Amino acid sequence: MVYTSEHPIFAVTVDVVALTIREDALCALMVRRGGEPFAGLWALPGGFVEPDEDLRAAALRELHEETAISAADVRLEQLASYGEPDRDPRGRTVSVAWLAVLPHAPEPRGGSDAASADWRPVDELLEAEHLAFDHREILSAGVERARARLEYTGLATEFVDAHFTVAELRRVYEVVWGRRLDPGNFHRKVTRTAGFVTRVGEFVNRGPGRPAELFRFGGAQVLYPPLSRWTFG
Amino acid sequence: MVYTSEHPIFAVTVDVVALTIREDALCALMVRRGGEPFAGLWALPGGFVEPDEDLRAAALRELHEETAISAADVRLEQLASYGEPDRDPRGRTVSVAWLAVLPHAPEPRGGSDAASADWRPVDELLEAEHLAFDHREILSAGVERARARLEYTGLATEFVDAHFTVAELRRVYEVVWGRRLDPGNFHRKVTRTAGFVTRVGEFVNRGPGRPAELFRFGGAQVLYPPLSRWTFG
DNA sequence: ACAAAAGTGTTGAGCGTACACCCATGG
DNA sequence: CCATGGGTGTACGCTCAACACTTTTGT
């Protein structure tokens, strides 16, 4: 099929920075490129937007093609758009990047158009890997956005199950921020910040130690005062 | 000229939310649309990206076409992209929105392709005006971004001259946030936050009252602790 | 019994708000 | 001399970082 236009031609794509926590490491969903350009390199899941498709819907579709995630419970936040004239050697493209946070890392599905997909630790990707296109910059922006969102929104609760313990929530902060937090002070701060968490009324035993109470997200749009990643601990 | 492509066709545009302060009101640069669609309504300055043009350069060019701003001293920050399938009745477009802050409101130039351009108070635009396309949403996002940036960056200094008094800076916060701030506490906070302002060593008299000392921006990337718009004052 | 984890108490330091107060000018 | 705005001092309250301590489990 060939399309025509009286305005300069752009192909519009979406790329998704999908983050999760696996084995105490912040991981991003990546696909290994099968064909040129950048064959064999890791790339963010993404692709072309359909002619009548909303941008957000396109991002959701691309994410769904790589993981069997139920579309309804993923919240996608727009990161930024990338449109350097030479970012794709095949032609002029503008990519709209999105951030998604998933609990429990659903296994990627193999049989899509991409050669293979997997969750990879972001530290390795950013330090040691050469990524396709400008995906290093996009991934970096996604991670930084997530780190900032933990400070003043309830984003951390999207990394864990609907019912979670305070310790599980603390683990999210520790992994994403890369620093240790004081368990006692964290507990007080989280439970006293209006709208952050709500008691469920149940307790669970995970290993030795006193049983932990279960909470769920309290619905707050903004946490105030925030949990500053620079001083909080 | 007719362009062809094997991928779905999108036209990519840029729209600029250019803010300044005039007569103690936060104002945005707007152009009145001459032709359809939305003829006669106010719209943000913007237009199509050229085939080999960087997105930021396109935003700068569109801003330059409406005001005689010297390209070098404007910092443009990307806001977000808007790509609803029906946002432009003429065809599928994706618009990348940018935020610019200008001191001293250079007079808009008349003779461009737009029928007329002018600085309009954002309060009026958001409360009472019907704007073209989805520009109300974009303008609203730009204003909100500016309000947030005042809290933890030096963005306020871009609203004033290179050399400014603390009172002039305070006026920026008061106008953008829409609330009064305590002059004494503001002075202390601004002068003691590392990297926010640097003494110039001169004093000026503007009307009655003790002469005010001149400062310049101190170069800080982030202000910590921030000036919270909810509690600071 | 012991280690480990959950959660609470306590204390001292620092910051922010409110507001009184002094300084330096124009009229 | 007074009004106006620039800038500093002071006191009270609040939050937070640090860390001791109690509670409740698994082994």
Image (tube, coloured by chain):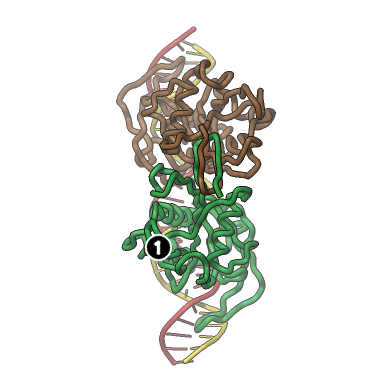
Chain colours: A green, B brown, C red, D yellow
Q: In what element is the residue under mark 1? A: strand
Left or right of B214? Residue B18 is right
Residue at image x 60%, y 41%? B92
On the image, the x and y values in percent for residue B68 come to 44, 20
Q: Nearer the viewer, residue A157 or B111?
A: B111
Residue at image x 61%, y 70%? A163
Crowdedness of circle 1 by 10 Å Cα count: few (<14), some, many (20+)? many
**Which residue is situated farthest in the front direction here?**
A1
Q: Nearer the viewer, residue B139 or A40?
A: A40
| Image-quadrant location for residue B178 | top right
Q: Is residue A41 visible?
A: yes
Left or right of B57? Residue B198 is left
Q: Is residue B188 visible?
A: no
Does A43 appear above or below B15?
below
Number of numbered discs: 1
On the image, the x and y values in percent for residue B80 come to 53, 43
Q: Nearer the viewer, residue D7 or A84?
A: A84
Residue at image x 59%, y 25%? B121
Q: Tell which subunit mark 1 falls on.
A: A
On the image, the x and y values in percent for residue B209 come to 45, 18
Residue bearing the label numbered 1: A42
On the image, the x and y values in percent for residue A138 come to 43, 53
Q: Amino acid at mark 1?
A: Trp
Residue at image x 42%, y 29%? B166
